[in-house]
Amino acid sequence: MKTIPLNRRAFLTTTAGAAIALAPGLAHAQRTGETPDPSLDLYPAKRNEKFALDRPVTDEKINGNYNNFYEFNSSKQVTRQAQALKIRPWTIKIDGMVEKPMEVGIDDLVRKFPIEERLYRHRCVEAWSMVVPWDGFPLAKLVALAAPKSTAKFVKFTSFLDPKSAPGQSSGNLDYPYVEGLRIDEAMNELAFIATGIYGKPIPNQNGAPLRLVTPWKYGFKGIKSIVKIEFTGNEPINTWKQMQGSEYGFYANVNPNVDHPRWSQATERRIGEDGLFARKRPTLMFNGYEAQVGPLYAGMDLKKYY
């Protein structure tokens, strides 16, 4: 196991620099000579009003330039570097304890299910938050497609490994490829989402193109980006941040104002973009405001132990 400096909050000090303009998909394709995204016709998707929120959506420019993506660097300014990742062709392998193992290209996968837009709260373990309009489909549909066996209890997600395109993967800041996981019942919850788009467009590289996991009741590090493999297992996967620093980052990563990070409080958060970059603190909601939908998943569990 590598030893790394884990002061995630210190990374926030790097965000006062100038914002990097977010290049639309077509403009980027023209500049780099890449083929335009074949999924452009799927966006913008119809909004699912079941997931409406009582707070404003974070400005797209702010969201596009305030990202944790350690594969590229350990600051929030990853947009420019992230464009080096080639997202076509892109194949997702689905295997493990399933009846229907498969390898499927991203452009086939995104057309297997209806794409919809959902407004979700996003809460980082660093105690900041946003509201994001994700486009994609329920993870439960992908689980059903794979037809897991009764012995499968968890879903393990693995991101890409390409140090030539992603210099952070050679920096020693984490062990790569990045790994995350969910229990099967978490993956089947109606909130669990596979994002393929954002702000009515295909998801850009800095946000985890071409597809990422979104679990809005959990801290943001759970939302693994640029997924290449989904494996169904009988044992709990060891997710990357737990492997690197298990005393600070657990498997469940549920947003919980009553369980502090060892080095800072989780009782409050800053809503990026609402009150300026360094927004005032607001109370953190249990399960990020999704307690009614996910609370029963953890009934009887000691959430201080299973953090």
Image (cartoon, helix red, strand yellow):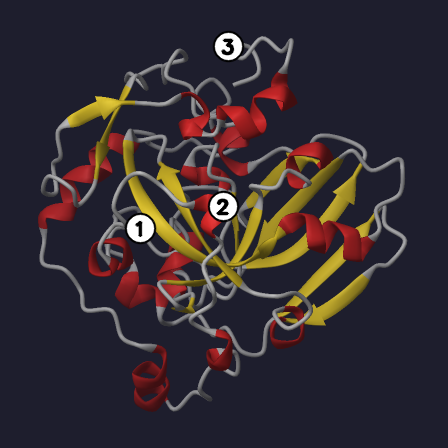
- In the image, residue 99 above or below residue 304: below
User: Can you say whether 53 is above or below 82 in the image?
Assistant: above
Give the number of the mark in front: 1 or 2. Answer: 2
Where is residue 280? Give x, y as percent.
13, 29
Q: Horizontally, is 222 left or right of 28 in the view?
A: right
Q: Check disc 3 and report its element: helix, strand or loop.
A: loop
Q: Could you tell me if residue 250 is visible in this image?
A: no
Residue carrying label 1? 67
Tell me the number on the disc at residue 304: 3
Helix, strand, or loop for circle 2? helix
Picture quadrant of residue 202: bottom left
Q: Residue at x 34, y 30 (%)?
A: 6
Q: Which residue is mark 2?
A: 50
Residue 290 position in % (x across, y down)? 47, 30
Residue 82 image offset from top left, x and y in percent: 36, 65
Task: Bin the neighbour count of mark 2 within 10 Å (Cα to Cα): few under 14, some 14-19, many 20 and up.
Answer: few
Residue 130 appears in view = yes
User: What label does residue 121 carry, if any?
Assistant: none
Crowding at label 3, few (<14), some or many (≥20) Cα neighbours within 10 Å? few
Specify the amino acid type for callout 1: Asn
**Vertically, is 127 above or below 15?**
above
Question: Is 62 left, or right, of 104 in this rendering?
Answer: left
